[in-house]
Amino acid sequence: AGVALVEIPLSERTGLSAKVARIWEGRLNGGMSKASPTGPEDFVVSVEVNPSPGLSTDKPVSIAKMLREGGVDVVNIADGPRATVRMSNTALGEVIQRELSMETIIHVCCRDRNILGLMSDLLGNYSRGLHNLVVITGDPPKMGDFPKATAVFDMDSVGLLKMIHGLNTGLDPAGNQFAGQAKYFCATGAEPGAVDYEREIRRLKEKIAAGADMVMTQPVYDASVMRRFLDDVASFPKPVPILLGLCPLVSSRNAEFLHNEVPGMSVPQNIRDRMASVGGGPAGVAEGVKIARELLEQFQDEVVGCYVMPQLGKYDAAIEVVRHLGYGADDSAMRRDAPVA
């Protein structure tokens, strides 16, 4: 067996990890303090931008460009979300990083590839400069367009995090030393509103022990649910930075669909009533932004940033949710990139 190397500090892995580490140690004092962000310079915003159906990257690249100009730090790209078929997220991530000089967060799920395939992809993606990952187990194929597709699941997110942690300490999955040392920055998902909440918290502790550096939450519309989750994570033996998941609703129909049809999503009655009172159209989008911003304003003083999942292509809404923090302005990108004294 090889000798594990010391992991490279977060401040030296990627641009994103360095900013997260600076905010976590500075504004939030390692999770011991609360302080509201002053703007894009001490807040992280990631927006989910997924491949379009088909062969072209033009549309998602143009969306990422608009978001970057509005001050957004990174886009995260899902790995066959809801078991649908799209261009590989790593291909789109490479194009965005090359054309826009914008970092991406690549989702890695355990559904489609065995251990050999996952390891091969990790080594290859590292060479392509895709160093920010969010590790998830993945949605089963029966949810998507090809329900008869074979699900692999050689390992779950905990096992995959351990494998990546090995690469970060210079060891392969067999525990042998290999040439070089990776510096992946690994986030993982968590569901504050999980039906089996105790299991969710237990699993999250396992993921952090396995090497997760940051948590990205599923969207929640109930502040009391998020309050419980943040308090529980703060009491962990090793608290970690959190990106607050936000999914701005766009219409009453959208709210009802998420509540009734999407596993793991719960939209409280009072929120559905608010959306019902405005219906859809521009008024629906505006109310959805307002709801998301209200939640963010309650918790922005204890998270490193937020992770916005726009609905039905409403990417402008992602900027509107964080406009009160200085995004979407002429100087937003400059403030985001400003060197910190």
Image (cartoon, helix red, strand yellow):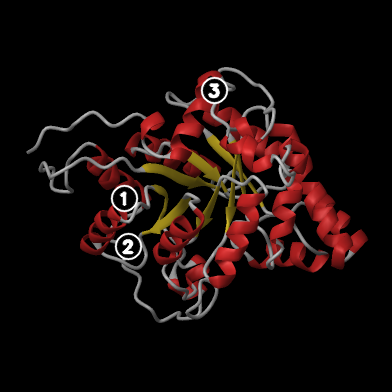
Q: Secondary structure at mark 3?
A: helix
Per the model, the C-alpha gap separating discs 1 and 2 is: 10 Å
In the image, 219 versus 58, the foreground residue is 58
Per the model, the C-alpha gap separating discs 3 and 2 is: 34 Å
In the image, 180 versus 28, the foreground residue is 180
Q: Residue at x 40, y 62 (%)?
A: 90
Task: Kindly identify the amino acid type of the residue bearing the numbered disc 3.
Answer: Gly
Task: Kindly identify the amino acid type of the residue bearing the numbered disc 2.
Answer: Phe
In the image, 226 versus 339, the foreground residue is 339
Sequence-earlier tag: 1 or 2: 2
Task: Kindly identify the amino acid type of the residue bearing the numbered disc 1.
Answer: Leu
Q: Residue at x 17, y 33 (%)?
A: 4
Q: Secondary structure at mark 1?
A: helix
Horizontally, residue 289 falls left or right of residue 181, namely right
Placement of 167 over or under 142, stated as above or below: above
Question: Residue under circle 2?
Answer: 153
Packing grade of label 2 (10 A; few <14, some 14-19, many >=20) is some
Q: Quadrant of the N terminus?
A: top left
Residue 240 visible from this viewpoint: no
Return the residue found at the far left.
Answer: 1
Question: Residue under circle 1?
Answer: 160
Placement of 33 over or under 335, stated as above or below: above
Per the model, the C-alpha gap separating discs 3 and 1 is: 26 Å
Placement of 1 over or under 49, stated as above or below: above
Residue 31 is marked as 3
Residue 23 in the image: state x and y as whole percent: 55, 27
Residue 111 is marked as none
Sequence-earlier tag: 3 or 2: 3
Quarter of the figure with residue 52: bottom right
Sequence-earlier tag: 3 or 1: 3
Horizontally, residue 99 falls left or right of residue 248, namely left
